[in-house]
Image: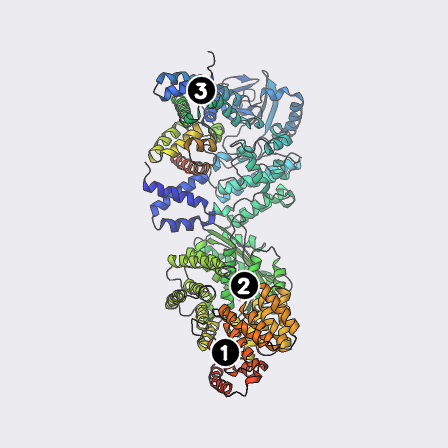
Amino acid sequence: MARPSPGEVTQWLIAWSQGDRAALDKLMPLVYDELHRLAHRYMSRERPGHTLQTTALVNEVYLRLVDQKSVNWQNRAHFFAIAAQVMRQVLVDYARRRRYRKRGGQAVKVSLDEAAIVSQEHGVDLVALDEALTSLAAIDPRKSQIVELRFFGGLSVEETAEVLKVSPRTVMREWSLARAWLYRELSQ
Amino acid sequence: MKSDRWQQIEQLYYAALECEAGQRAAFLDEACGGDEELRREVESLLASHEQAGEFLASPALEVAAKLIAEDQFASAVGRSIGHYQILSLLGVGGMGEVYLAQDTRLDRQIALKLLPVHFTQDADRMRRFVQEAKAASAFSHPNVAHIYEIGEAEGVSFIAMEYVEGQTLEAKINGQPLETGEILDIAAQVADALEEAHAKGIIHRDIKPGNVMVTARGQVKVLDFGLAKMTRHERGRLASDLSTQLRTQPGLLMGTVAYMSPEQALGHEVDHRTDIFSLGVVLYEMATGRRPFTGTTTGETLDAIIHAEPEAIVRFNANAPAELERIIRKCLEKDRERRYQSAHELLIDLRNLKRAIESGAAAAAVASQVRGRRLLASRQALALAAVVVLAVAALIYALLFRGVPAPPQPEIKSLAVLPFKSLNQEVKEDYLGLGIASEIITKVSQIGALTVRPTSAVRKYATQEIDALQAARELKVDAVLDSTFLHVGEQLRVSVNLLRVQDGVSLWADSFDMRFSDIFAIQDEVARQVAQRLRLQLSPAQQAQLTNRYTSSADAYDYYLKAMHSYEKWNVSRAELDSAIAKFKKAIEIDPKYALAYAQLAGCYTTVALFFEPEPIWLDRAGEAMNQASALDPNLAELHLVRAQIFWSLAGGYRIEEAIREMRLAQQLNPSVGHEDLGVIYNHLGFEEQSIRELKRAIEIDPTSVVPQDRLAEAYVWFGKYEEAIVAYDRVIAIEPNNLNAYQYGALPFLYKNQFDEAQRRLERALALNPRSHLALSYRGLLLALKGQFKEAEAQIPEIIQRGQKFRSYHHATYAIACIFALEGKRREAVEWLRKTVEYGMPNYPMFARDPFLDRIRKDPEFIQFMNELKIKWEGYQREFE
């Protein structure tokens, strides 16, 4: 399959936000593709020094998926919000299906807690987080959105602030509270 | 939409986060105002915030990608590599994946680490690694996971090592402190392993909880000995990478970086002491559930390792003994020369502490007595143990010193209580350190048998790094109480050391662990102990005074201390005074029965009235606060001192007898206060002997304060002792070259001695220091009159009145005016101004009778009549007060 241009991806995102369900079907394989490339990089890492670049790697993926520059200024906020929503939907969906597969008996039996190292370091249960985030949105929609933009959308504090038209300080503060709230929700 | 409740929670959460950690509890107490549910909610969010660590630090995409990676690794299961059959994935570490495998030859389970292909392709690097790993594999220790084999099969390089069934220490800690006994067990086993490895020249370099396995039976196995070089051989490059481009990248390598020693973080050469530091980090994490050095980026974490002091352990774990904190801090010294120099030394301390704890509190006393410390956990919890501790300590003392005659000791007559130094360098709490000292000063001075330097004399040491004995010598005392405290949240640890200055011998050392709310009990205890150690005889009444406390609310007391800190700086600026007022009010709000806070609040109001805003409202407020204080406790020395200030003021009608009575009452309640005030007021009455005696006593109590010296010099002036006055002012100037009084009052001896040039010079200096000084202006007028320039002298008068009449020292100005008229021979005016001088609080009959400047009018009938009237009044004072 020929790789779609960033411009096309942007069009699909906008279409999806306008209710075109088929657009998501086009977006999903793209995200999966990136996901697997990223996973492969993790698997083949040779030393911790290499992992230093993973954030850069992730950013690069986001950049490839969403072409920020082609979006005009007025729509930026709207656009990022959509991109983050799509990411959330696709990634949570992936985690949910994986969980189902494991419950279905194909789980690998691991006998040591060390097996949890991977999930401990970056450990967050995406499915549970998704549910908690929905609960948070009922109490405080903006905080939920900040988490969506930053965690799922991969935006920095400054970018999030720009999207929401608030100060970076506000984003930092609300992020701190949202994170504490979610953490408590998930550890209960 | 947002509910009001949520908004309330939100705002409190932000505000609490901005509070200093130590102040949060107090802040929430106040802000929640008894709404327990609200408080619980905010506190639980704050706790989650603290625990959240790296939660959500990596983007979702990364999280998902790692899930995929994990699944892929799992697919190696079932493969065989040489005689190892892979059973399952154990984990993925920095060096690739680790599997549980069956050694089909020896029929045992092993851990099989598969090395990344890129790694093995670098022949040179592989050779070096194999060399080191072989050295490690030759070494065997019960607490080290043994390396069986390093080999290659089916094109894959692997390390086969002992499979340890258990939990990693990382999983075991899981954000929560471990039991002290368990911490010591685990750390001792790691230290034991390190000791042996170091002896064989093997450095681990990567000690971290993920590398320490704990079996179900509590046995520790350290993993990956000698393997760290494989991942870290390019340390120098790593460090420079980190310092440049990577400082801003979040969430990376945290797991490993957080345990690095400062020398590793800096990319310097390391030796075995790097492992001691890393073990210190692990110990800290076991004791608190959190890492000592953290940051949101790798660079920040490295910065913290290199520069930051970890937060106090007691903050996160109230049960951690002080000795454990000391051990950990010694491991975590930035400078490796100051750490434990060997794992063996550390092991000994860990074992000693372990033994002390195992054989109970009694043994803790034995072990720690050696270091002059006593470990005492929560007072309430260990009340019984404390009794045992004291009994055992007494026994040891008796055994050690039985039959040894006590050496002759120099008598101790004076004591300095230095401000308690905060060990928590992040939180500035000078007010607390000074406040605790100040309370102990008050308590010990009340005994009266000892000269105790007042708070004003020791306060400067709150911010000065100085050796206690050196400070003691500056303060000219025989004994000094040198103390530290660590205040974290609700926890307070106070350590005291009473030193004899002559030979530096410690007369008493102790440390107290308690909740902040127990602070009063500790102050009482310290004061009582100081008295006891210095062999002061206490009457039952004095004993009772020692345990006299004014509030039982720690929060109220906290505000009180902060308020006093501001109040004592009132002459620096009005803002300090306003801040003191606000804080005293807070203290009263929390504890409406806090008599001392009312008394000090009254003092603040009075100070505003007398020195800043001579409006009746301030004195009304002062009166109200005084009534409250006195209704609660009529026997507060502070209350009487405030009242005295009001009596001897324009607003109080210059009721000098009342003022003296109040000051004397204050002195009866606390023999160390009021000497300066009394010396000054006696001076204005012309009671020479008493004035000089009180002022000298004030200087004795506080030889470092310039104020009583200044007052004494002034007294010499009014008693006509000009030579003494000149010498005394020279001393004041030597200490404070810009002391205004030394130039304005200091000009007078020269006027009396007809040395007009010197007088002129001093007055000019005074006016340069304060161009608004009504006294310098008054004495310049006097100088003109002495030179015969009466017209010019008189021309100064309106301005003198205008500038001076609101100040308490106005009576000196009116007296100078009287002298100007007297010199000029204007008898009626002179007498009129003398009457004003009496009216404004200076009925100094002996001075009027002696002053040569009044000689020209002595024969005037009006003057004679005035003096006769004053004499009757003065003799009344004399009968009552002399």
The residue positioned 62% from the left and 21% from the top of the image is: B120
- The front one of B602 and B669 is B602
Q: Secondary structure at mark 2?
A: helix
Residue A137 percent coordinates (x, y): 35, 32
Q: Nearer the viewer, mark 3 or mark 1?
A: 1
Crowding around mark 2 (Cα neighbors within 10 Å: few <14, some 14 to 19, many 20+) is few
Front residue of this view, candidates A158 and B773: B773
Q: Name the colouring of the figure.
A: rainbow
The chain to which mark 1 is attached is B
Total numbered badges shown on the rendered structure: 3
Kind of element beneath mark 1: helix
Amino acid found under the numbered disc labelled 2: Ser
Which residue is disc 1 drawn over?
B833
Residue that carries the numbered disc 3 in the rendered image: A31
- At numbered mark 3, what does the secondary structure look like: helix, strand or loop? helix
Q: Are marks 3 and 1 on the same chain?
A: no
Kind of residue at badge 1: Trp
Q: Are circles 2 and 1 on residues that touch, CB within 8 Å?
A: no
Q: Dividing the image into 4 quarters, which one contains the C terminus of chain A? A: top left
Question: Given the image, what chain letter belongs to the residue carrying mark 3?
Answer: A
- Name the residue carrying label 2: B456
Q: Which mark is residue B709?
A: none
- Circle 2 marks a residue in which chain? B
Quarter holding residue B780: bottom right
Point out residue B463 in the picture as x, y percentages from the top left corner.
Answer: 57, 55
C-alpha separation, residue under disc 3 versus residue under disc 1 = 97 Å
- Residue B871 coordinates in the image, percent (x, y): 49, 85
Q: Is residue B211 above or below residue B873?
A: above
Q: Residue furthest front?
A: B791
Q: Is residue B706 left or right of residue B27?
A: right
| Residue type, mark 3 in image | Val
